[in-house]
Image (spheres, rainbow, N blue to C red):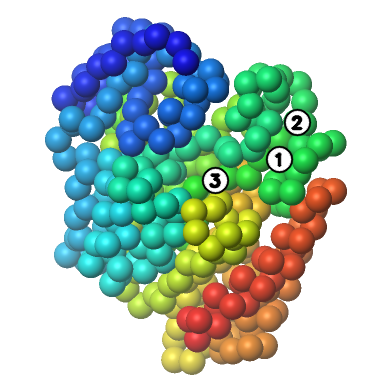
Amino acid sequence: MNSFEFARATSVAQARELLAEKPGAVLKAGGIDLLDHLKERLVEPPRVVDLKSIPGLARITAEADGGLRIGPMATLAQLAAHPAVQKSHPALAQSCREAASPQIRNVATIGGNVLQRPRCWYYRLESYKCLKKGGDVCYAVGGENRYHAIFGGGPSYAPHPSNAAVALVAFGASFVIEGDKGPRTVAAGDFFTLPTKDPQRENLLQPGEVLTEIRVPSAAGWRSAYDEIQERADFDWPLVSIAAAVKNEGATVRDARVVLGAVAPIPWRSARAEQALSGKALDEAAATAAARAAVVGAAPMSDNGYKVGLVQTLVRRTLLSLA
């Protein structure tokens, strides 16, 4: 770990100024992911800018219309326990509840969870200069790829690590970002980017920009659930995860959202699974059809073909829980 300055910002504008003054400076939210990067020398910043002292960035507000406004510094534990989030957007509350361990959830923020870098061991080890670090090879292609992507991979195959992002995409959330030209709002479904665009990036956040708010529209009339499959019951990264939401008209599914996690470099929305549900009663037959549709186009690597079966099981099981 290199030596660096530590600066506490008291406003978003000051945070951006502190970043601009020292090229290579980085922001710190909860610091969970940043600490890993510092220890492995994946980043060696001259300055770390702490966001914890900025007023208002940890607020969770339930709007009159049923929507949510979430500050990026709200912890995963706060969101998981928030009565309004549990009632109106249960898949989001559950996704935060399933992340990491209780100790980490009390510190880790939703902004940090959404913006964390991939957990691929080749990326995380200093000795491998992979595509994510400006190299010219994804070592997972010919190496250990048990936990890697089966959708949307290439040239890099590291899966997106965020639990919360899966639910946020399912709910049609958007991110408010402050930059040189003022605030801009980006839909969660457009915010995350595939490695074909730039293998060193996972999202549209530009250097010097700060995520200031997450907006989640009302989920009135929707039923939602989040679930995941892990190797170990506690404190483990998901092998496969899902956030599903359905809106019925009588006994018929009028609209559906099926978003998969840990299977692609971005939260992976399955349009085929959604189409398989549209206009159908949400029963065993429809859930099974959606599960089969969800794996169309999957391209497993040498060691992760098991994820195809897990996706089908998880999609079917989660949809039936909403029936």
Residue 150 coordinates in the image, percent (x, y): 73, 52
Q: Are marks 2 and 1 in contact (CB under 8 Å)?
A: yes
Q: Amino acid at mark 1?
A: Tyr
Q: Amino acid at mark 2?
A: Cys
First reached walking from the N terminus: tag 2 or tag 1: 2
Image vertical order of residue 98 relative to residue 126, above or below: below
Which residue is the site of mark 2? Answer: 138
Which residue is the site of mark 3? Answer: 161
Residue 47 occupies quadrant? top left
Residue under the point 59% across and 64% down:
229
Q: Secondary structure at mark 3?
A: loop
Q: Secondary structure at mark 2?
A: loop
Q: Secondary structure at mark 1?
A: loop
Is 265 placed left or right of 58 in the picture?
right
Residue 53 coordinates in the image, percent (x, y): 18, 30
Is 92 placed left or right of 316 in the picture?
left
Image vertical order of residue 8 relative to residue 150, above or below: above
Residue under the point 49% across and 29% down:
36
Viewer-proximal residue among 242 and 107 = 107
For marks 2 and 1, give the CA distance. Answer: 7 Å
Residue 312 occupies quadrant? bottom right
Residue 273 occupies quadrant? bottom right
Q: Which mark is residue 157?
A: 1
Image vertical order of residue 215 relative to residue 21, above or below: below
Is 256 placed left or right of 309 in the picture?
left
Q: Are marks 2 and 3 in contact (CB under 8 Å)?
A: no
For marks 3 and 1, give the CA distance. Answer: 12 Å
For marks 2 and 3, give the CA distance. Answer: 17 Å
Label 3 packing within 10 angstroms: few (<14), some (14-19), many (20+): many
Q: Amino acid at mark 3?
A: Pro
Residue under the point 74% across and 68% down:
309
Viewer-proximal residue among 107 and 283 = 107
